[in-house]
Amino acid sequence: QVQVVESGGGLVQPGGSLRLSCAASGGIFSRNHVGWYRQAPGKERELVARISSYGTVNYADSVKGRFTISRDNAKNTVYLQLNSLKPEDTAVYYCNQVPFRIDSWGQGTQVTVSS
């Protein structure tokens, strides 16, 4: 199974920025599509960004133009740059393969956007 560690979350004001990191064991992220998911209280876990093994990216409409996903295969790490943050971005953010694997969720990292 894949072991992942998400980091980089925190408390920021609206309009602020954060950079999230997802470090994975082995070379799985270099061989598979990888996504960032988020889950807010009372809501379903949703995919917000994905990146393929060859670098193509896709974003949910709610974050397009504000978030940027990237990957560093040498470090087996995937990043999510969050800019122009809004209160509705508040959630726990997770990384996983796309489609996700049940046994590959990490603990997630909390992003809170509040004034």
Image (spheres, grey):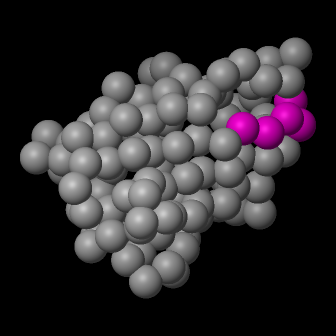
Whole-percent x, y for residue 67 in the image: 69, 55
16 magenta-colored: yes
Which segment did they paint magenta? 14-18
Q: Is residue 87 above or below residue 36?
A: above
Q: Residue at x 68, y 50 (%)?
A: 81
Left or right of 45: which side holds 31?
Answer: left
In-front residue for pair 91/80: 80
Whole-percent x, y for residue 44 in the image: 40, 35
Whole-percent x, y for residue 46 in the image: 44, 46
Give the position of the C terminus as an image quadrant: top right
86 magenta-colored: no
Res. 85 in view: yes
Q: Quadrant of residue 112?
A: top right
Q: From this viewpoint, which residue is outermost toward the front? A: 74
Q: Is residue 46 above or below residue 11?
A: below
Q: Is residue 13 above or below residue 16?
A: above
In-front residue for pair 24/112: 24
Whole-percent x, y for residue 87 in the image: 75, 28
Q: Residue at x 85, y 24 (%)?
A: 13
